Image (tube, rainbow, N blue to C red):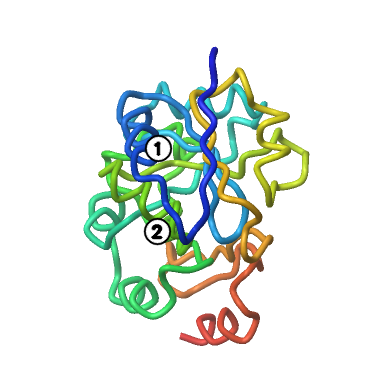
Amino acid sequence: MQTKLYTMTETTLDQTAIEDCAAILRAGGLVAFPTETVYGLGASAFEALSCARIFEVKHRPADKPLLCHLASLEQAEELAYLTDTARALICRYTPGPLTLVLKKKPCVPDIVSAGGDTVGLRFPANPICRALLQACGCPVAAPSANLSSHPSPVTATPVIGSFYGEIDAILDGGKTALGTPSTIISLADGKPALIRAGALPEAEWKEILTL
């Protein structure tokens, strides 16, 4: 496979490259891209076969679900049953390094949720990622863009080393701003529960847990 490689900065977006990568995602391809936390490896969240390729190229265990990266609250409503608490947290803390786990709707392929009844929702703040999601027009399922058990990448260099020739495109947006994966909080059982401490400041996620 010939992998397309695009380079840009957060302040100087290459809209042609973004549109090309969005078209690749809509057509069922895989694209690696920067977020404010780490680089992600994405596919359209509605394309089960494309999401299966993520597991294949990453050597990812089948029981590890994929987070869905979103551009709008409307996309979140499409994928999950949002509670009032979820809507309030989305409005207050996103876009940013917070992932919320909620009960999923039937449109979410089982491979995305690893056969479970929940889905993780994330609204990235990185301008390149946001532009890609808006151009794509669909939720993008994406774990970190690393081989399983390898460190999560904060630049495109290890992404290129691991996946060049294996995926359709790589967006090189330089070093990520935070360098730590998102904080994951589950609302699936009603009361907020911490799944993973990450880039969201500790004071903020502890405040969420008191809701």
* Label 2 neighbour load within 10 Å: few <14, some 14-19, many 20+: many
**Residue placed at 54% from the left, 81% from the top?**
209
- Image location of residue 14, percent across then percent down: 41, 45
112 or 126: which is nearer to us?
126
Look at the image and tell me in which quarter the N terminus lies: top right
Real-space Cα separation, disc 2 to disc 1, in angstroms: 33 Å
Which residue carries the number 1 mark?
Answer: 17
Q: Is residue 122 above or below residue 162?
A: below
Query: Of label 2 and label 1, which has the lower sequence position?
Result: 1
Residue 22 point in image, percent of width and height: 34, 36
Disc 1: CA contacts within 10 A as few (<14), some (14-19) or many (>=20)? some
Depth check: give the residue in front, 40 or 189.
40
Per the rendering, the mark at residue 102 is: 2
Image position of 75 with respect to 93: above or below? above
42 or 83, nearer to the observer:
42
Which amino acid lies under the numbered mark 2 shown in the image of this protein? Leu
Nearer the camera: disc 2 or disc 1: 1
**SS at circle 2:** strand
Q: Report the side of 47 relative to 168 (left or right).
A: left
Q: Residue 181, labelled with which disc? A: none
Depth check, front residue: 78 or 19: 19
Q: Residue at x 71, y 39 (%)?
A: 157
The residue lying furthest to the front in this view is 12
Q: Of the residues shown, which amino acid type is indicated by label 1?
A: Ala
Find residue 35 and report its horizontal and vertical position in percent. Answer: 53, 55
Quarter of the image where the C terminus is located: bottom left
